[in-house]
Structures are given as structure tokens and as C-alpha cells.
Image (cartoon, rainbow, N blue to C red):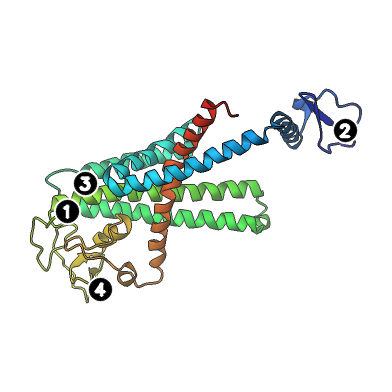
Amino acid sequence: MAGVFEVEVDGVEHDHGLEQHGEASQIDLSKLSPEEKWRVEHARMHAKHKGHEAMHAEMVLILIVTLVVAQLVLVQWKQRHPKSYNLVTLFQMWVVPLYFTTKLHWWRFLTTWFIFSIITAYISFRATRKPLDCTTPRLVYKWFLLLYKISYAIGIVGYSVVMFTLFGINLLFRIKPEDAMDFGVSLLFYGLYYGVLGRDFAEMCADFMASTVGYYSASGMPTKHLSDNICAVCGQPILVDVSEEGIIENTYRLSCNHVFHEFCIRGWCIVGKKQMCPYCKEKVDLKRMFSNPWERPHVMYGQLLDWLRYLVAWQPVIIGFVQGINYTLGLE
């Protein structure tokens, strides 16, 4: 294609360096390539917003002020009423992505979302029953620990694919950059989203189960005395000594000398986000308890998920609120 065509929108001409034989006063978008269509739309957008610099500055100011105020409100809410904050955040995490993916017809995500919701609903139902079945705590922590590890692995793979694409390694396998990037970003989204959501449900279940078992209470003294050979998380006997190597799982002793099943204390600390002893509430040193360097990334990954919760649960709400303010004030 040779020559230059100009786009005239609302009396303003825009020269975008595309060449074409003959006159270009009338453009048929259906005959243009995707790149040329994008340039035409780009020219129209510039013409439409020309001279609106003051309005754009006002919109940016509204966005910054709203973000700061929203952050202060959320921090105060979390400090003063943590239970209601966690419940509302969990609901936001569960519903907001569902709305957008349904609107965009992302059927793969919707399929995994329904599978996750059905299994997690059953696990949560078991965890909130009274009296609590003796096998429920182990079932709950095994499920959420498995979900946590799967989301961690998927997130790492997605991040690796994105980085490989940025360095052009995908070209060695003759994979288009846009396809490789879409695949990597999708895996990263799946891993982070289900990692955050799984941890929130695990924390809720951990609170219900621990209070039901009786060795832990959010405030005040436990309602039961803990024996030396009983796990305070699940209330079941300790069968493997701390110094022995277990066939299925080991036994962990905290700095306060209380002992727990491996799956229970891992679920309680890493997945359930409880960094204290379930019985005496002494602070748990996660680096000391999980001294293996291969286990420490799981702790850092959990902290990353806590930070990402704000982006997934509250950022869309804040942006929607900002758009409502702009619409009310007549800002486009």
C-alpha cells in the first residue's frame, strides 16, 4: 500500500502516515486491515478529545483522591470491624470476577469457578456443622492446602510463560507472541485468583472449626484443657513423635512446646493465615517452623495473595465509583 491518507473527524484532519493510491476522502472501514482500523479509531479519539485537557486533569484528580480516601476507609474498616470486612471482601472476591467473565463469555473460567464453588461449598458446610465430625478438620485442611499448592504452581507457570514471551523464547517454538502472552496471563490470573479465594475460605473454616473443637477462641481462654498428645487444631491424637519420621505426615512442635499434625498446622498457619499457636496464642515464627528453603516461598506467596486481594475485590468497585462521579459531574 503506498500514499498517505488523511482522516477527517469533526473538521479536524489527522495524518497517520498510511499510504494509498487515489483519494482517501471516503474511507470504508470494512476494507481496512486491523492495524489501519485501529489508526482510524485512534485519530477519531484524538479529534473527539482535543481541547479537553482541563477536563482530563480534573478526572485524574478525582481518581487520585478517591483512591486515597477509599484506602483509608478500608484500612479503618479492617482494623475496627475485621469480621465484617473479611466477609464482604470474600463475597466481593467470589462475585465480582463472575460478573465480568459472564459478560465476556469466558466459559473456561466459569467452568472452573462452578467446580471450585461446589467443592468449597461442601467443605465449608462440613466445617460449620455442630457437633464437628472428627474427620472434618483434616479434610478441610487437606483440600485447601492442595488448592493452595495447585494455585501456586499454576501462578509460577503463568509468570514463567509471560517472562519467556517477553524475552522472545516463544519464537523458538514458533508460537505467536500474542498467543503465548494470553496463555501466560490466563494461567497467572487463575493461580492468583483461586489462591486468594481459597485462603479466604480456609480462614473462615479455620475459625469455625477451631471454636467448635474448643481449644481455640478468638478472645478469652479455651474451653478445654489441651493434653500433651492432642492436636489443638483438629482435636485428634498425635500418633507420631516429633523426633520420628512419619509415613504420611510428621508432627510439628512450636516454640511454646505445643505439638500438632503437619497438615493441621500448615493449614492453620499458611492457608488459614493464623500466625499464632491455636491453644496459647503465642506468635508463630514461620521461618523457624518451615526451615526448608523450598517451603519459604509458600509463605511469601501467601503474603502476595493478601496484597492482591485489594486489587481483585475492591479495585473494580472503586473504579466504578469514580466513573459514577465523572458521569454525575458531566465529565467524559
In space, the residues marked 1 and 2 are separated at their CA atoms by 76 Å
Residue underneath mark 3:
127
In space, the residues marked 2 and 4 are separated at their CA atoms by 76 Å
Pick out the residue farthest to the right.
Answer: 22
Q: Residue at x 38, y 45 (%)?
A: 74
Residue type at tag 3: Ala
SS label for mark 3: helix
- Quadrant in the picture for the N terminus: top right
Q: Which mark is residue 219?
A: 1
Q: Residue 190: x and y, percent? A: 46, 47
Res 3 → quadrant? top right
Q: Residue 125: x and y, percent? A: 23, 41
Q: Residues within 10 Å of mark 1 (few under 14, many from 20)?
A: few
Q: Residue 146: x and y, percent? A: 34, 54
Residue underneath mark 2:
20
In space, the residues marked 1 and 3 are separated at their CA atoms by 20 Å
Q: Residue at x 32, y 47 (%)?
A: 78
Contact flag, marks 4 and 3 (Cβ < 8 Å)? no
Q: Which mark is residue 245?
A: 4
